[in-house]
Image (spheres, rainbow, N blue to C red):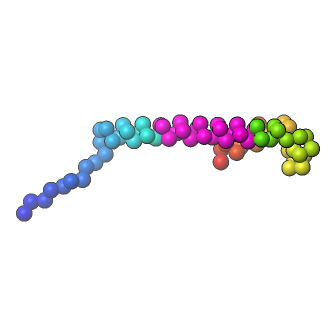
Amino acid sequence: MAAFDSHRTTYGSAVLFGRLGATICNVIGSVAAWNDARVTRNALAALSDRELEDIGLIRGDIDTVARRKALY
């Protein structure tokens, strides 16, 4: 009786497409993080100084908060 092995290792094109897929995912993730930071920055910038004070921020904190949110 003969045995036939149908399992293949990941060499050649599979590795290339894996790296390409990972690169595409990284690009999409970076664009999504940038957009989230942009939306957060715009929403906070639209608030008055009094509203920012109510949530414990000053206008100078907006970029820091937007960048921090993009990292999470």
Q: In this view, does 67 lie to the left or right of 50?
A: left
* Snapshot quadrant of residue 50: top right
Q: In this view, does 69 lie to the left or right of 16?
A: right
Q: Is residue 58 visible?
A: no
For residue 7, above or below residue 19: below
Q: What is the magenta segment's predominant secondary structure? A: helix
Q: Is residue 5 left or right of residue 32?
A: left
Which residue is found at the position 81% from the left and 37% from the top? 45
* Position of residue 58 measured from the top left corner of the image (x, y, whole percent): 87, 41
* Snapshot quadrant of residue 69: top right
For residue 22, above or below residue 54: above
Which residue is found at the position 47% from the left and 37% from the top? 23
24 part of magenta stretch: yes
Which residue is found at the position 58% from the left and 38% from the top? 30
* Snapshot quadrant of residue 12: top left
* Position of residue 1 measured from the top left corner of the image (x, y, whole percent): 7, 63
How many marks do you count on the picture? 0
* Position of residue 37 measured from the top left corner of the image (x, y, whole percent): 69, 39
71 vs 40, nearest the viewer: 40
18 part of magenta stretch: no
Q: Give the range drawn in magenta.
A: 23-41
For the view shown, which residue lies furthest in the left direction?
A: 1
Which residue is found at the position 42% from the left and 36% from the top? 20
Q: Is residue 17 left or right of residue 46?
A: left
* Position of residue 27 measured from the top left corner of the image (x, y, whole percent): 53, 36
For the view shown, which residue lies furthest in the right direction?
A: 50
